[in-house]
């Protein structure tokens, strides 16, 4: 089961008040949730923050609706879902976070998260990109500066991944 967060209720999506001691692990990671649809959960934001005082960077996927199933796995290169075109993501190691059932757009088709590559100036996180939003599957690609352990957890309306510095 996912790790519990140490953030108090009402704190920001990528903030912590103390360094927790949850164990670090390697990919792949898989978490399964049974989500009746409709409505399909929607990724409404992707945020990141560095936590140098605790030695990690955090990526947060904010969701409306129930928390979907997700997997995190390592890949040698990042390809856009559906088209198969390469995505030039910064970093030397790449992870894919795949969520289902979910979408990153409103029912009208309007995107709910920014597309394209987002470059970051953090110790471990080099960047991220929405790599896919099709047929109830959302894929977020993460570029890292080298190999790292991860920690995965859930808060109400959020799934977070910590990357050890």
Image (cartoon, helix red, strand yellow):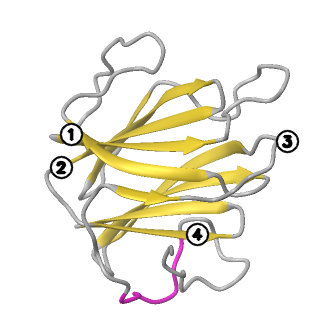
Q: Which residues are magenta?
A: 15-21
Q: Residues within 10 Å of mark 3 (few under 14, many from 20)?
A: few
**Secondary-structure class at tag 1:** loop
Residue visible at 81% across and 43% down in the picture: 37
Query: Could you tell me how far apart the alpha carbons at marks 4 and 3 are, in whole angstroms?
Result: 20 Å
User: Horizontal and vertical percent for residue 103?
Assistant: 68, 34
**The disc label shown at residue 91, or none:** 1
- Please tell me which of labels 2 and 3 falls first in the chain: 3
User: Horizontal and vertical percent for residue 59?
Assistant: 46, 56
The picture quadrant where one finds residue 89 is top left
Quadrant into which the C terminus falls:
bottom left
- Please tell me which of labels 2 and 1 falls first in the chain: 1
**The disc label shown at residue 154, or none:** 4
Q: Is residue 31 above or below residue 133?
A: below
> Would you name the residue on which mark 2 appears?
145
**Secondary-structure class at tag 3:** loop
> Would you name the residue on which mark 3 appears?
39
Query: Could you tell me how far apart the alpha carbons at marks 2 and 1 are, in whole angstroms?
Result: 5 Å
Of labels 4 and 3, the one closer to you: 3
The picture quadrant where one finds residue 127 is top left
Main secondary structure found in the magenta portion: loop
Query: Could you tell me how far apart the alpha carbons at marks 4 and 1 are, in whole angstroms?
Result: 26 Å
The picture quadrant where one finds residue 38 is top right
- Please tell me which of labels 4 and 1 falls first in the chain: 1
Of labels 4 and 2, the one closer to you: 4
């Amino acid at each position: 089961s996912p790790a519990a967060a140490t953030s108090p209720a009402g704190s920001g999506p990528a903030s912590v008040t103390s360094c927790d001691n949850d164990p670090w692990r390697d990919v792949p990671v898989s978490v399964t949730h049974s989500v009746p649809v409709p409505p399909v959960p929607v990724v409404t934001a992707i945020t990141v923050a560095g936590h140098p005082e605790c030695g990690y960077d955090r990526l947060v996927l904010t969701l409306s609706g129930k928390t979907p199933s997700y997997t995190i796995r390592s890949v040698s290169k990042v390809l856009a879902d559906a088209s198969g075109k390469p995505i030039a993501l910064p970093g030397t190691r790449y992870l894919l976070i795949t969520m289902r059932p979910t979408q990153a757009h409103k029912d009208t088709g309007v995107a709910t998260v920014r597309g394209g590559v987002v470059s970051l100036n953090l110790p471990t996180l080099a960047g991220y990109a929405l790599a896919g939003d099709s047929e109830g599957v959302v894929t977020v690609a993460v570029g890292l500066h080298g190999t790292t352990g991860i920690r995965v957890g859930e808060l109400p309306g959020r799934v977070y991944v910590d990357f050890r510095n």
